[in-house]
Image: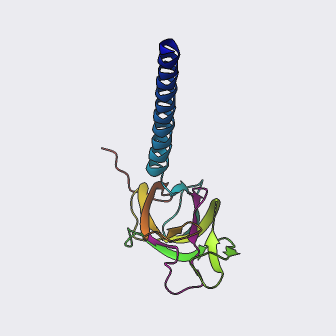
Amino acid sequence: MRLRSRSCVFLFGLLLVGYAYSQSISLSSHVSQEKTKAEEPIVTVRVLPPERPVRPGQVFELSLELHILPGFHINSEKPGDELLVPTSIELENKDAFEIKEIIFPEPQVKKFKFATKPLSVYEGQIKVKLKIELKEAAQANAIELAGKIRYQACNDEACLRPERLPFKTTLRVAGNTSSNRS
């Protein structure tokens, strides 16, 4: 009888250790997955500048390719609810550049738990085209164009605080006779 109770206690202890070990493995993999998700930005941007040099006074096209993390969306430029922040784009170097037109893609219209009516949103990957004028005063052979995308990301249940995502690229300037050579 004593041997039997020792065997039961031993087996129970072994079972308990095995269960504790499996829970620690499960917990650590869950924490690492959460950490990875938290470190990954919800929205990223890739700038697609014009292939050819731009002349001062010329209006050129530049595209911004936005990647939105699965499970999230961002509001369109006209989200359909005045309490939501629309997606917008602004340039920093206003002495050298002026936005003439922003062409957003066709948004999706979807219903969400947090809204009483359907909203206009973007998901996945989108491309926004900007028509920008390089002002006549630009005298360099290359010039940096920088700006920010303002957006509000949401999931199916709630929206996050608005964010500003910076972007920049260097444009080649054509038609300048001035040179930086020594």
Quarter occupied by the C terminus: top left
Please say which color scheme the image uses: rainbow
List x then y, in percent, for residue 68.
58, 59
In the rendered image, the vertical position of residue 73 relative to residue 53, given as above or below: below
Furthest residue in direction front, as rendered: 1
Q: Does residue 5 show up?
A: yes
Check residue 69 for magenta coloring: yes
Residue toward you, 7 or 50: 7
List x then y, in percent, for residue 99.
50, 75
Furthest residue in direction left, as rendered: 182
Q: Could you tell whether 177 is left or right of 22 in the image?
A: left
In the image, which residues are magenta? 64-90
List x then y, in percent, for residue 60.
57, 66
Q: Could you tell whether 140 is left or right of 5 in the image?
A: left
Check residue 48 for magenta coloring: no
Residue toward you, 47 or 20: 20
Furthest residue in direction bottom, as rendered: 82
In the rendered image, the vertical position of residue 115 relative to residue 174, given as above or below: below
Q: Does residue 135 show up?
A: no
The residue shown at (48%, 56%) is 171
